[in-house]
Image (spheres, coloured by chain):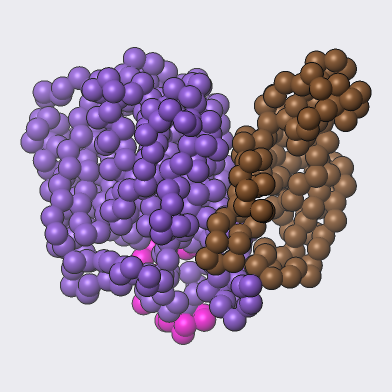
Chain colours: A purple, B brown
């Protein structure tokens, strides 16, 4: 095993999941889908943002929780990255809103990133690079989505809402050090949304093997090759979770056991939170991880690309786990809504006057 | 006009910053130019505690225009842990879950928006404390 010593790590982590849940069986009831057509997705409920929530408000709360754990002066944050495919403005950064809300302004970089479900992870890689180079002391990477799906499309059964955030800083004092990261991207037409269209489309025949599996396996195998690490060197393995079955299958193919994957699986409970999907898996793992444990993280975004990270937990984690709400506090705070309420909250109900 | 006023007052609204009087020691929110208790203009900005108790509330079902998606709108009188009282919207709570003495905490939300082609205004609302609802 040859692992380069990481110069940067995670000082604070935070998640956010809205209160409302739409059962997938309620979507099936409305659209007349028989059980066998959606049960295989292994998603029981999806989280739904409330009528006054959006990717900015959720991203803020995740960032605020990360800041509580990092215990740093927010003015020391020198970069804020916001990864989303459901930005509230087509043009006007969400990163400056969140930077201002947490008190990182004005002396900071700030930008919104887009790479389907992987933009938040690119923000994490950029944060690690900026901190490792010494250009900034701390950086904030946020992944947040209120994912869109066309009513009645298979994506509607999984597309949900949530946010994850990480304060990245020097290895010293970090709760978890990123010892290596590796990225694998190609041009793949598996999923897209054209400008000014409300819902994304997916390219049948491209979504599974050539996109999700090829890129995650490319990234993880690349990390293995560069570091000499093997599946058995990891205590946890977390993958992007478009549904409840893909992450389990890709883990199996790469040689990981279900026990390594289980803790980081959040999609079966709350659906696919897109830019927060794998990152919320990391949040849920960090909530319970012990010093010395090693975590594999592999987010994925359509279009397509995947990052593989090897992360080592330090002694600092124990104290930080108690400083902000755990992800399960949000997952367990749930109120079921019916399809009609969901259409109102999500503004799919368009007959209402909007002034 | 609305946009300019909202923008000028965004920092207290985003970060729950109030003003503390150097003369009588009492804090208030939103921050004003003079202390509402003794009139002193010797004030300093302070970060207020994000938790409090619901002392009174009203539920408005009939909402005009842009904000109707958020109906019903619940407005509460909240007493923060340091005694400061403020009026704010409540969220993530059903009308039947409301009761006096409910423990609440601040959360960032959309307050209003200027149609679907204007700006979105954010600020703090209060919700039942996570893990206690
Ligand atoms: Zn006074």
Q: Position of residue A253 (x, y in %)?
A: 17, 51
Front in this rendered view, residue A105 or A339: A105
Residue found at the very far right of the displayed protein: B38
Pick the front one: A350 or A251 = A350
As drawn, is A12 to the left or to the right of A305?
Answer: right
Residue at the location (71% across, 45% down)? B126
Q: Can you name the residue that lies furthest to the bottom here?
A: A32
Q: Is B15 rendered above or below residue A25?
A: above
Classify A11 as above or below A338: above
Q: Position of residue A307 (x, y in %)?
A: 22, 43
**Which of these two is toward me, B73 or A232?**
B73
- Is A121 displayed left or right of A74 in the figure? left
- Quarter of the view holding residue B14: top right
> Taking the image as drawn, is residue A176 in sight?
no
Q: Where is residue A69 in the image (x, y as percent from the top left)?
A: 50, 26
Magenta region: A29-45
- In the image: residue A60, left or right of residue B101: left
Residue A239 placed where, x, y %? 29, 48
- Residue A336 seen in the current view: yes
Instruction: Reply yes or no: does residue A167 show up in magenta.
Output: no
Q: Quadrant of residue A82?
A: top left
| Above-or-below relation of A182 to A331 | above
* Residue at far front of view: B1
Q: Residue at x 20, y 34 (%)?
A: A181
Magenta highlight on residue A42: yes
Q: Is residue B107 above or below residue B23?
A: below
Question: Residue at left 55%, top 38%?
Answer: A101
Q: How many labels does the image show?
A: 0
Residue drawn at point x = 89 percent, y = 25 percent: B39
């Amino acid at each position: 095993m040859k692992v380069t010593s990481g110069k940067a790590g995670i000082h604070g982590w935070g998640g956010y999941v809205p209160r409302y849940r739409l059962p997938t069986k309620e979507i099936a009831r409305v659209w007349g889908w028989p059980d066998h057509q959606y049960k295989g997705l292994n998603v029981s409920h999806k989280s739904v943002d409330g009528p006054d929530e959006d990717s900015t408000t959720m991203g803020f709360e995740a960032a605020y929780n990360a800041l509580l754990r990092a215990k740093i002066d927010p003015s020391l944050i020198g970069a804020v990255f916001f990864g989303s495919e459901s930005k509230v403005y087509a043009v006007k950064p969400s990163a400056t809103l969140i930077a201002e809300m947490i008190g990182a302004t004005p002396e900071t970089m700030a930008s919104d990133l887009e790479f389907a479900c992987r933009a938040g992870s690119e923000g994490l890689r950029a944060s690690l690079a900026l901190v490792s180079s010494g250009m900034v002391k701390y950086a904030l990477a946020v992944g947040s989505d209120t994912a869109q799906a066309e009513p009645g499309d298979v994506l509607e059964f999984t597309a949900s809402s949530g946010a994850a955030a990480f304060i990245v800083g020097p290895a010293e004092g970090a709760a978890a050090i990123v010892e290596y990261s590796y990225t694998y991207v190609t041009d793949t037409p598996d999923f897209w949304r054209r400008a000014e269209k409300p819902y994304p489309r997916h390219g049948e025949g491209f979504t599974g093997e050539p996109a999700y599996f090829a890129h995650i396996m490319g990234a993880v195998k690349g990390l293995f090759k560069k570091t000499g690490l093997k599946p058995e060197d990891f205590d946890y393995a977390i993958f992007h979770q478009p549904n409840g079955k893909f992450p389990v299958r890709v883990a199996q193919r790469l040689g990981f056991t279900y026990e390594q994957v289980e803790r980081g699986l959040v999609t079966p409970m709350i659906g696919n939170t897109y830019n927060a999907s794998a990152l919320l898996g990391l949040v849920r793992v960090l909530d319970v991880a012990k010093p010395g444990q090693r975590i594999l993280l592999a987010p994925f975004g359509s279009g397509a690309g995947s990052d593989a990270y090897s992360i080592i937990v330090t002694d600092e984690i124990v104290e930080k786990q108690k400083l902000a709400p755990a992800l399960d506090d949000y997952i367990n705070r749930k109120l079921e809504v019916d399809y009609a309420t969901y259409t109102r909250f999500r503004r799919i109900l368009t007959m209402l006057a909007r002034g | 006009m609305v946009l300019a006023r909202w923008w000028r007052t965004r920092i207290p609204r985003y970060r729950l910053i109030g003003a503390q009087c150097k003369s009588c020691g009492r804090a208030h929110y939103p921050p004003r130019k003079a202390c509402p208790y003794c009139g002193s203009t010797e004030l300093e900005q302070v970060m207020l505690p994000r938790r409090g108790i619901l002392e009174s509330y009203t539920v408005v079902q009939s909402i005009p225009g842009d904000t109707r998606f958020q109906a019903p709108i619940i407005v509460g009188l909240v007493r923060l842990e340091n005694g400061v009282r403020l009026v704010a919207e409540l969220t993530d709570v059903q009308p039947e879950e409301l009761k006096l003495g409910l423990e609440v905490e601040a959360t960032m939300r959309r307050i209003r928006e200027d149609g679907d082609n204007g700006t979105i205004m954010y600020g703090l609302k209060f919700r039942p404390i996570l893990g206690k609802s």
